[in-house]
Image: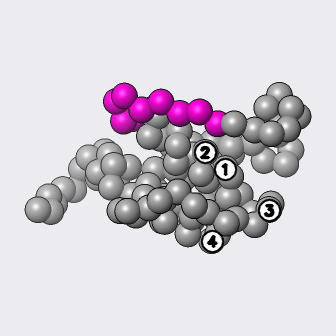
Amino acid sequence: MTIATTDPEVEFKRRIILDRKYAIENLLRIEDKRRQLVPMKLWPIPADIVDHIVAPGFRGVIVKPAQVGASSAIIADILLDTLFVPGTNSVIIAYEDFITQR
């Protein structure tokens, strides 16, 4: 059932719930190369990864290239679930100390 509305706030909330990429790009901020907080923008490869993560039946195996924002997209998806899905716990494990200290 589709609910039509002209209220921008209601439409924004509906899109946040139904569209994971829209939620990431409109709710989350990330540090750029100058360490300034900017809205998170999903480039093509991370956007495809988010599409696959939220697809029904996804099993959790991703082969990802380096330096395209794939890890940030995956972490953003996990963060939204952790914040908005009751009972969700998340753990991120890193194999390098430097990465965990940032």
Tell me the distance, in whole angstroms, between the alpha carbons under discs 2 and 4: 16 Å
Query: Pointer 1: residues within 10 angstroms few (<14), some, or many (20+)?
Result: some
Judge depth for marks 3 and 4 and give the one in front: 3
User: Mainly helix, strand or loop, the magenta region?
Assistant: loop
Where does label 4 land, which residue? 44
Is tag 3's residue or tag 4's residue first in the polypeptide sequence? 4
Q: Is residue 27 left or right of residue 14?
A: right
Q: In the picture, residue 96 is in which quadrant?
A: top right
Q: In the picture, residue 35 is in which quadrant?
A: top right
Q: Is residue 59 left or right of residue 94?
A: left
Q: Amino acid at mark 1?
A: Ser
Q: From this viewpoint, is residue 56 visible?
A: yes
Q: Is residue 101 left or right of residue 51?
A: right
Tell me the distance, in whole angstroms, between the alpha carbons under discs 2 and 1: 5 Å
Residue 9: x and y, percent? Answer: 31, 45
Q: Amino acid at mark 2?
A: Ile
Judge depth for marks 2 and 4 and give the one in front: 2
Name the residue rendered at 64%, 36% in the picture.
92
Residue 101: x and y, percent? Answer: 83, 28
Specify the label residue 63 is tagged with.
Answer: none
Name the residue rendered at 35%, 62% in the picture.
56
Specify the label residue 75 is tagged with.
Answer: 2
Tell me the distance, in whole angstroms, between the alpha carbons under discs 3 and 2: 15 Å
Q: Amino acid at mark 3?
A: Ala
